[in-house]
Amino acid sequence: MSLDKDARILCKYFISSSIAIYSYSHVDLGTNPSSDTPILSLILISIVINSVMYYCLPSSITPLIKSYIVGTIHACISVLSVCIFFICSTVNWTGPNRLLGGGIKGTNDEMMTYIVCYSTGYFIYDIIIMLGFKSVEHQSTLIHHMVHVFAMISG
């Protein structure tokens, strides 16, 4: 496949996606998360859990290595959760509810709300650690985390 052909396929995909978004803008899209989901509490709990993990690690370990350990635990939990989601769910990539509306109530889509809250809390925790320990701070990682937090909070 040539680069031009790939570009045309991508272009057609984005155009059709834009049309789909526009044509479904009047439809009630998804029901998740419900208004009674304690999103801020879940994010705060995630920050606390990640902080406790960090501070329970031996003080002989440098802050950078501690940060790597907590980050690896976050990555494992996130990947495992997504794998479980794909194994236990029927994934409908073309349905507007799954793509635009935050999921369908009564399906495993609801689990993803919790994963997003956990990840948002992790990124906030890691930003705090980076700002508190200069040996952990890397400008690119800080920007990466800030972009993720903004994207997750904005939906």
Image (cartoon, rainbow, N blue to C red):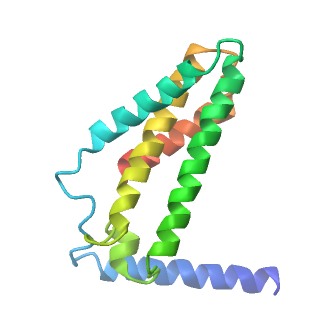
Viewer-closest of 110 and 129: 110
Viewer-closest of 134 and 23: 134
On screen, residue 55 versus residue 120, left or right, reads right
Q: Is residue 117 above or below residue 27?
A: above
Q: Using the rendered view, name the quadrant where residue 118 is placed.
A: top left
Total numbered labels = 0
Q: Position of residue 66 (x, y in %)?
A: 65, 25
On screen, residue 81 versus residue 64, left or right, reads left
Q: Position of residue 153 (x, y in %)?
A: 38, 45
Identify the residue shown where x is 67% and y is 34%.
Answer: 140
Q: Using the rendered view, name the quadrant where residue 67 is placed.
A: top right
Viewer-closest of 9 and 29: 29
Viewer-closest of 134 and 50: 50
Q: Is residue 53 above or below residue 112?
A: above
Identify the residue shown where x is 70% and y is 23%.
Answer: 64
Quadrant of the drawing holding the N terminus: bottom right
Q: Is residue 153 above or below residue 61?
A: below
Identify the residue shown where x is 27% and y is 58%.
Answer: 33
Quadrant of the drawing holding the C terminus: bottom left
On screen, residue 34 versus residue 49, left or right, reads left
Residue placed furthest toward the right: 2
On screen, residue 142 versus residue 99, left or right, reads right
Q: Position of residue 127 (x, y in %)?
A: 53, 28
Q: Using the rendered view, name the quadrant where residue 42 is placed.
A: top left
